[in-house]
Amino acid sequence: MLKIIFAVIGRDLKLAMRRQADIVSALFFFVIVVSLFPLGIGPEPDLLRKLAPGVLWVAALLATMLSLPRLFADDHRDGTLEQLALAPHPLGLVVTGKVIAHWLVSGLPLALIAPVLGVQFDLTGDGLFVLTAAILLGTPALSGIGAIGAALTLGLRGGGVLLSLLVLPLYIPVLIFGAGAVDATVSGLGGEGHLSLLAAMTFASLGFAPWASAAALKIALE
Amino acid sequence: MLKIIFAVIGRDLKLAMRRQADIVSALFFFVIVVSLFPLGIGPEPDLLRKLAPGVLWVAALLATMLSLPRLFADDHRDGTLEQLALAPHPLGLVVTGKVIAHWLVSGLPLALIAPVLGVQFDLTGDGLFVLTAAILLGTPALSGIGAIGAALTLGLRGGGVLLSLLVLPLYIPVLIFGAGAVDATVSGLGGEGHLSLLAAMTFASLGFAPWASAAALKIALE
Amino acid sequence: MIYWNSFADFLHMGGYGFYVWGSFGVTALIMAVEPILVARNRKTTIARLKRQLRAESRTPTE
Amino acid sequence: MLEADNLECVRGERRLFAGLGFKLEAGELLYLQGRNGAGKTSLLRMIIGLLPPEAGEIRWKGQSIRRNSEDFRADLCYLGHLNAIKEELTPLENLLASAHLADEALSEDDALDALEQVGLAGREDLACKYLSQGQKRRVALARLVKERRPLWVLDEPFVALDVAAVDWLAGIISGHLQRGGLAVMTTHQLVAIPAGTVRELKLS
Amino acid sequence: MLEADNLECVRGERRLFAGLGFKLEAGELLYLQGRNGAGKTSLLRMIIGLLPPEAGEIRWKGQSIRRNSEDFRADLCYLGHLNAIKEELTPLENLLASAHLADEALSEDDALDALEQVGLAGREDLACKYLSQGQKRRVALARLVKERRPLWVLDEPFVALDVAAVDWLAGIISGHLQRGGLAVMTTHQLVAIPAGTVRELKLS
Amino acid sequence: MKDRFNLYRFASPATFYPLAGTLIPYFAAIAVLFGIAGLYLGMLVAPTDFQQGEGYRIIFIHVPASWMSMFIYLVMAFWAAIGLAFNTRLSGMMAQALAPTGALMAFLSLWTGALWGKPMWGTWWVWDARLTSELILLFLYIGYMALTAAIDDPRRADKAGGLLLLVGVVNIPIIYFSVKWWNTLHQGSSVNLTKSSMATTMLYGMLLMAMCFWMYSIAVALMRVRTIMLERERNADWVKAELAGDVQ
Ligand code: HEM
Ligand SMILES: Nc1ncnc2c1ncn2[C@@H]1O[C@H](COP(=O)(O)OP(=O)(O)OP(=O)(O)O)[C@@H](O)[C@H]1O
Ligand SMILES: Nc1ncnc2c1ncn2[C@@H]1O[C@H](COP(=O)(O)OP(=O)(O)OP(=O)(O)O)[C@@H](O)[C@H]1O
Ligand SMILES: [Mg+2]
Ligand SMILES: [Mg+2]
């Protein structure tokens, strides 16, 4: 069981490395979107500090979402997905591997760079720590939920935008608790409650999402 | 000359209608992103009013960008692009048609719904008008510039994110002047200067971008 | 000729020491590291190409 | 070993076939024929369990493939229209990854050997996107060289292959039949498979 | 009419061919042969002007195709590996749109007639994504029925077609040659073209 | 005719490679000399600025770095244009060799500017036209490098990258003239050939530093281009000969 999950993770990471652009660019998208806001909104530092958690979370969410359409699309287009569905183990395991790989490539780097960006928005030490923790805890849920959306819209033309339509509403709780954790910490209320809710969402979605996605994939393959 | 442009527009619009999801979803993405911000940032009305132009513009920009990767990708994948490049008229004309169709599908609807969203952010009558005008004038430039990026990254795996890396920096001026126009109007300075700059950018990019994109497409087809 | 009275003054830069030396330091660092990286890259590339050349001369492909 | 009863296939609003059945034993090849659009690909996808039939049942070793699907899939090797190879990976990596994911043991030496047999020696380390159409197809076919699962389902395997490769593949398939394997295949090209019993099934 | 001198093709780091030349007159068919990966597709893409040759020149009616590219393209009809049809559109819409975009006049009646000839009668109004592989190829081939441009370049046109369709297409090509057209073609299937002079060119 | 032949000869990697090899030490040496002279004038001799105090000394790298970041981009665009027009192999290699240095210069301009802005304007960063357009320049460099790295076929990469460079060239006049066109925080141009508002030691120090940056950039770019040449032309006979010998 673990063997197949690791096999999938290994292959997907190798593909990501081979494309290079993937990892670096998801990060860059995050960085650029975060820097766009001050442009549109104006340079007042007080205002910016207030915005920081919201902007960072929305950017993280969009960066994750942008990489979702390709989660299964490449495998679908070149026929690999059929082969995976025909392998002699449950498709849910394969999807679990793919979700983890997706997080390693698109979620983890965001968590690692978030503190740097947070500094630019004048966040304090504590706020920065909670920001990183929140992104680290919340992004796996984004990958998991996103996988369901990606599977449901697989093969539909115009799926990319349809996907965001399906997935964004489900991302809202993560956004609220993620940004809330930072806000609460900054205002001295302590963000532990928010963080543990995020962790719960992540566990729930990692346990449940792969199987829902697998069911959706089988429908897409008919 | 016009005949071929109209033929391309006609075909692309028909495809968009057939897919349905396309038009509705770009709009929905816009609406959802705009509504996400209050969630991430908190409900203070004063703060929101200040944010309005920036958030609306960033959302418009992201919505446009999200639909860019498919501007040429579908035609590339199924071989239509080769046929277009082999047609007995300059490829730049074809691209002009595609850019216009892209704007009609992804830019125009945003301009039409922007006033409704602006009202929710407490913008005044004048501000709303300038907001609509700015989005109407600025989005064609987004489509034009985006076409260059889409053509340059065509066929590259991971192109979607690379595309945003190339295109977003070039969108910054549009964002600044677009949001600036609304800001200036709201603060009573008058946004005409910004608007005429936007119009200039749109004309320049509509005249120039299709030919640059056509050159990039020929490179991609080699 | 020399404008400074003492070395400590020079380091202090009239209170702007952090900014001035921050600028000059990073610049110096970059200008020292970049050539080293380029030279390293050149060495590894040459080593790789040599290996490839040897491999090719052993097994002629088609 | 492989039996189908009374199968019915409806795609869109068209009933492609109904009441279709066959039986296939070890060492036999089922050769599906029919004009374009007759429903060959649809039938193959029913056989491998990706497309649920409108009516009827398919059994493998006497068990419905719906119910015992994991056991069935452990005995199955499918090769579709699409090559199922990754353009960014090299032929060698592709071959190893697909064996890995299908839970098969394949050593690197075996994989290299298979690639040499399909005529890709010297290109093991070139990313697949630089291969020609026929070469890509050959990478996909290299899987069959070391494949020992009993049931092969092949959808137009000869497409894009040059004459030498067609002969080679015919040899591989008859080797499989001689070892007691089963195969289901469609093709519009006339290719003689030198060994095994060939049953023909004409869809129309 | 179509001449090539001293062509050289380099893909990646491999020189596929060099010093290649040919001449083709009205009514002649150039039949490119070669194993998988020999460079047939690459040569075709040079001939249609999408791939600039490393060295050498291609001339159409005595003029370099690089310099007079719009005139050349007005005389050219290319059919590649890919079908160039839109999955969302129906066969009829596809046919009309592609004629439109290529600046050809094609009436709806003519288009319907062409679709009937390729055996898609009754499916004119079904979106192409529901067609089988061979039927999609037929939609792409329907363009050739009314095509009167002098130079046809066809990359493996027979792939995925059933026997009846292969015969039909061979007929269409020889009709084109008889009308004084030129054609350049590759295929791994042996198909006899009943009319016109066939020149063979072997890449290796 | 003879002239053309010569030009063509130098545009060929086989001739350019050894030429670059001999030139590199000279450029490096000149860069060091100018650097020492410039630093001596700028850091030790030049008097303080009565408005900005000693903080102004950042100018001795800020301005050269800013100039070079724009100049290198223009040179890359020039090579790109040559490459697209005449299909010469060398031009793409030159552009690729210059890009990282240009990006570093843009980064230095931003970095030193930010370090300067904090004491002078009280903030590290404002979104004014010059600063923003310089940031866009950095992104253009990075975009160029990412794009060329994403395309495996080097000739295709050169062409696509070249096109991007030409499109981005509009940004350069925007950076340069932004202080004139818009009313911004950033200081206007003070170097003027006819009448300069700066103290002469300051001016000379700055010009010497600019020369140092220029020569440095040439030296590093030439080093890089030699590696790129070996890599790209690895199947050419001259590279094989070169590799068979004792290359450094
Ligand atoms: C990150 C922020 C900054 C950026 C991106 C930036 C960018 C540039 C650029 C591109 C130039 C060269 C253009 C020209 O020669 O006209 C330049 C020159 C200059 N900058 Fe900045 N700058 C920044 C911050 C600052 C600050 C904070 C100051 C001083 C308070 C400053 C003072 C100057 C001066 C004095 C020049 C020379 C102008 C001249 O003499 O021509 N800059 N800067
Ligand atoms: N972009 C590329 N970069 C590197 N190598 C390439 C590229 N495109 C093709 N090749 C190589 O060029 C060779 C010829 O390819 P081409 O597609 O022309 O072959 P072909 O004769 O059409 O083969 P087939 O019969 O399989 O279609 C192949 O060996 C392939 O590996
Ligand atoms: N999802 C679908 N919805 C509606 N009709 C479909 C669908 N998929 C296939 N069809 C129809 O079913 C028929 C059979 O398709 P199938 O792909 O099985 O044919 P095939 O025998 O494999 O043909 P070919 O030789 O061309 O590959 C076709 O007429 C096609 O139009
Ligand atoms: Mg089929
Ligand atoms: Mg080919």
Image (cartoon, coloured by chain):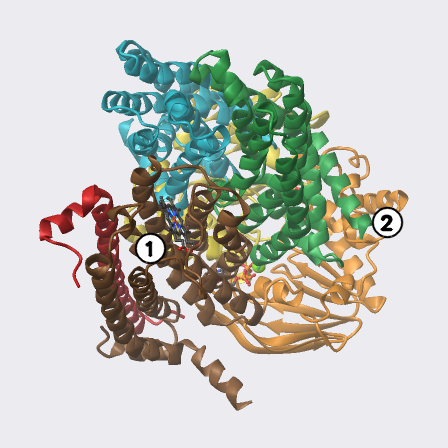
Chain colours: A cyan, B green, C red, D yellow, E orange, F brown
| Number of residues whose C-alpha sits closer than 10 Å to that of mark 2, classed few (under 14), some (14–19) or many (20 or more) | some
Q: Residue furthest bottom?
A: F2
Q: In this rendering, is residue E159 above or below B102? A: below
Q: Nearer the viewer, residue D74 or E32?
A: E32
User: Mark 2 — on which chain does it sit?
Assistant: E
Residue D108 position within the rendered picture, expressed as x and y whole percent measured from the top left: 29, 50
Residue under circle 2?
Answer: E106
| Element class at badge 2 | loop
Q: In this rendering, is residue A145 above or below A25? A: above
Q: Nearer the viewer, residue D13 or D75?
A: D13
Query: In this image, C57 relative to A55: left or right?
Result: left
User: Mark 1 — on which chain does it sit?
Assistant: D
Residue A62 position within the rendered picture, expressed as x and y whole percent measured from the top left: 46, 28
At label 1, the amino acid type is: Leu
Occupied quadrant, residue C37: bottom left
In the rendered image, the quadrant that contains the N terminus of chain E is bottom right
Ligand 5 quarter of the rendering: bottom right
At label 2, the amino acid type is: Leu
Residue under circle 1?
Answer: D112
Q: Nearer the viewer, residue B187 or E98?
A: B187
Contact flag, marks 1 and 2 (Cβ < 8 Å): no
User: What residue sits 45% from the left and 19% below the top?
Assistant: A171
Residue A19 position within the rendered picture, expressed as x and y whole percent measured from the top left: 40, 46
Asked if labels 1 and 2 share a chain, the reply is no
Residue E103 position within the rendered picture, expressed as x and y whole percent measured from the top left: 81, 53
Q: CA distance from mark 1 to mark 2?
A: 53 Å
Q: Nearer the viewer, residue F69 or E128?
A: F69
Query: In this image, D142 relative to C41: left or right?
Result: right
